[in-house]
Image: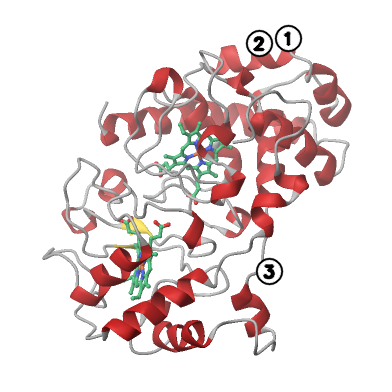
Amino acid sequence: MGARSSKTLYSLAVLALAGLMVGTALAQAPASTPAQRAELGRHLFYDPLLSSDGTVACASCHQPQRAFTDGRATSLGAGGRAGVRSAPSLVNVGARTRLFWHGGSPSLELQALGPLSDHNEHDLSPGEVVARLRGSRYAPDFERLYGRPADLSALTDALAAFQRSIVSYQSPFDRYSAGDAGAMSEAAVRGLDLFYGKAECFHCHAGRNLSDNLPHNNALLLFNPDIGLASLTGHDSDVGKFITPTLRNVALTAPYMHAGQLQTLPEVVAHYNSGGEPNPNADPLIRPLNLTPQEEADLVAFLESLTDPAVATNPAWGRPHSVAGENP
Ligand code: HEC
Ligand code: HEC
């Protein structure tokens, strides 16, 4: 299944359920705290109960030790079927204003319906999801936290609450920015100056999460059928535009770009230094940067300083003891 048809499936599922969900959510606001709902969401995030063949959980593709990515160029879902895009990091995902690589989903609540119904991911119909939840050991938790039997609205609320709790601003870069001059290596500090100076990365990788949440074409070779933002707008000028990803924990999230086209951070920096591949839609900021080999290495050292090791080990974000499976 190509990017286009699979994304159309996502959109249809989302549209069909949006009205229903909003209606239900308004009718019965949950009588519980976000922390309680996040804890239920954590269990559901790790539990393969929510997949057609019982092998796929959200955490199959969003693994804490890889900053909630999966280490693959493109993800593998139920039945081992391959998807067309790379799993993005979920660290600080609550701060993102547009989700998915092409920006096609506005909220974490709606987003979760995509992977649940996608044939290449969890591969379950909405009705099956609800039936499984109501017959599962989580049924009493839904009753207690939401005051009603499990439904899609409560499921996506709990998953979103968990994902919003994955907040990390504890990297060496954060400590350096807060005044701890020794937190970053000298090479990383030189790289920081390049990032915000000569290399001009900061225009798109802007703000605290190093993303402007906007679509750009960064001049990658177009070698797969994924047309990015153009799949939403139909404009030729949007072909190959994808939302700028966060760079937090980027040393843990290889391979890189929407389809894992680049393997390592030195390869990414070399791509930008070269000015990228010829592309009519490339952003004007993507042009030869004339960085020396030393400067390229410094930029890589800066990207490595964006890692918070606690993301992998924080028990509040890890696999619950009661959910079987290898700690992914
Ligand atoms: C088979 C692997 C796989 C599974 C399972 C999976 N995801 Fe994803 N996830 C992806 C891929 C690939 C993308 C990028 C999709 C796109 O951009 O079209 C993604 C995107 C996302 C995003 C958007 C992040 C961003 O910054 O744009 C969120 C949030 C997310 N997934 C949460 C979840 C949740 C919650 C579940 C469980 C219900 C889940 N995922 C299950 C692979 C997976
Ligand atoms: C014109 C905006 C723009 C500029 C300037 C820019 N980037 Fe990007 N960056 C993007 C976009 C968009 C993507 C995702 C592209 C895709 O997957 O098709 C990206 C992806 C990346 C990734 C991969 C992240 C991941 O999770 O896969 C890294 C690393 C990165 N950029 C680093 C840099 C560095 C370093 C610079 C400066 C040399 C830079 N970027 C300049 C827009 C930009």
- Vertical side of 225 occupied by 296: above or below: below
Bin the neighbour count of mark 1 within 10 Å (Cα to Cα): few under 14, some 14-19, many 20 and up: few
Q: Amino acid at mark 1?
A: Gly
Check whether the beta carbons of the residues at disc 2 and disc 1 lie within 8 A of each other.
yes
Q: Amino acid at mark 3?
A: Gln
Check whether the beta carbons of the residues at disc 1 and disc 3 lie within 8 A of each other.
no
- In the shown orientation, is residue 147 left or right of residue 72? right
Bin the neighbour count of mark 3 within 10 Å (Cα to Cα): few under 14, some 14-19, many 20 and up: some
Query: Does mark 1's beta carbon lie closer than 8 Å to ligand 1?
Result: no
Q: Amino acid at mark 2?
A: Ala
- Residue 22 visible (yes or no): yes
- In the shown orientation, is residue 27 left or right of residue 224? right
C-alpha distance separating marks 2 and 1 = 6 Å
- Residue at numbered disc 2: 131
Check whether the beta carbons of the residues at disc 2 and disc 3 lie within 8 A of each other.
no
SS for callout 1: loop
- Residue at numbered disc 3: 170
SS for callout 3: loop
C-alpha distance separating marks 1 and 3 = 40 Å
- Vertical side of 308 occupied by 154: above or below: above
C-alpha distance separating marks 2 and 3 = 40 Å
In this rendering, the label closer to the viewer, 2 or 3: 3
- In the shown orientation, is residue 65 left or right of residue 134? left
Which callout, 1 or 3, points at the residue further toward the start of the chain? 1
In this rendering, the label closer to the viewer, 1 or 3: 3
- Residue at numbered disc 1: 135
